[in-house]
Image (spheres, rainbow, N blue to C red):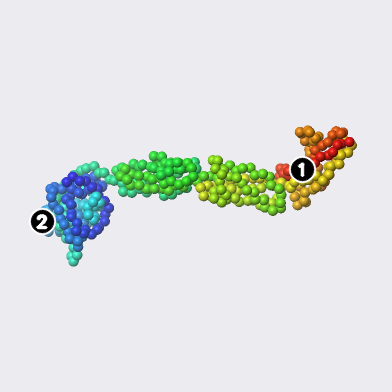
Amino acid sequence: MNMRKRIGSLVIAILLSVTLVPAAAFAADRQTGSEWYPASSGWETKYSSNTKVVQIILVPFTLSDRFNPNALRAFALKVLAERNSATTVRLTYVSTYSGTAYTDAKNVAPGTYSLCLLVSASGQSSPVVDLKGEVVVRAGTLDVPATGITLNRTSTTLKVGGTAALTATVSPTDATDKALTWKSSAPTVAKVDSAGKVTALKSGTAVVSATTGNGISAQCSVTVLQSIGAASVAKVADKAFTGRQVKPAVTVKVNGKTLKNGTDYTLRYGSNKNIGKGTIVVTGKGAYTDNKTVNFNIVPTKNSLSKIAPGARQMKVTWKKVPAAQKVTKYQVRYRMQGAVAWKTKTYSASASSATIKGLAKGKAYQVQVRSVKTVSRVNYCSPWSTTKGSGRIR
């Protein structure tokens, strides 16, 4: 038999009605790269269900006679008491042989060995050695397959455009082939390159996996969120002062898609009570993340004109003042000759409620509007202009 198998993990297990295969099934020595072959073929041993193979021992011919079981037994028991003996190799049989079997091989030099099993049956006070044949150890090249992969993270959350570096540790450390294939289950959401670098492309989820040549794999779950900071928010129109918190609605879009309040984002309002700048904080939710602050203007309430009295090349304009709680800074009156396009504007103090405008054209009619203005931090917040009112003909 020329079958080669690797040396697996050191464990002790119960052999239940097991056939011991010839030594050709022994795998390459993990540390030295040596390989084990039978000196002859055709031998095998069966044990009953109450027998446990405790250890497998290789004994150099120079130290013991392979045809003297008593000598081998004595030598094996001595080896058990001297675990660090450099002249023996101690192995353990694991379950039935199916590619996982023998470990703890240390410094197996090429040569011919007697193979004996240290077995223990129920009712025995101590294990006994059973000689099974001879083994030739030859130098060889070891192929150690990968048995596991560990990623530096099993889950990660990224923003669109963000990246993450995944690193994989292949076990055992002396695995012959540590090459990996990286793959994303949703490459349009998150792609991964041959070095394990993940790039987020759009909101959604993906599973990135690293796989060895013999099919061992590990996964990392990737969640991609869209930053709400990249959203466009429609301009919020000026809102009139009410004395209460102003909470206007907003329209939020990402890549042309209109987002839904409560599903894709939430809104948090500033105090928004006084005339000046109001604020709205849009916070991403669900597939969206981050914040975006939106500003709008809170302005004085709209004025109205009470009366326009035409006179000799002049007119007297009277308006209703806004409530004192608004604490406006000034009033503005604008006028133009009926049919004209351009307006002329005059400014009056906050205490004024009327004004006389002079230098008008005789026989012409004028259009007039008024508004209130409050200056906050050197910025003028103006009410809408009032409804236009005509003056009648100037004398």
Residue 170 lies left or right of residue 162; in this view the side is: left
> Which of the 4 image quadrants contains residue 94?
bottom left
Amino acid at the residue labelled 2: Asn
- Mark 2 vs mark 1, foreground winner is 1
Q: Residue at x 54, y 50 (%)?
A: 263
The residue shown at (17%, 46%) is 1
Q: Residues within 10 Å of mark 2 (few under 14, many from 20)?
A: few
Query: Of 173 and 377, which appears nearest the observer?
Result: 377
Q: Residue at x 10, y 56 (%)?
A: 68
Q: Hey, what amino acid is under mark 1?
A: Thr
Q: Quadrant of the C terminus?
A: top right
- Percent x, y of residue 332: 78, 41
Identify the residue under disc 2: 68
| Residue 5 locus on image (x, y percent) | 23, 47
How far, Cα to Cα, is label 2 from label 1? 122 Å
Rendering coords of residue 162 (x, y %):
48, 42
The residue tagged with tag 1: helix, strand or loop? loop
Q: Secondary structure at mark 2?
A: loop
Mark drawn on residue 119: none
Q: Name the mark on residue 387.
A: 1
- Front residue of 9/358: it is 358
- The answer to which of 82 and 266 lies nearer the viewer is 266
**Vertical arrangement, residue 81 with respect to residue 269, above or below:** below
N-terminal of the two: label 2 or label 1? Answer: 2
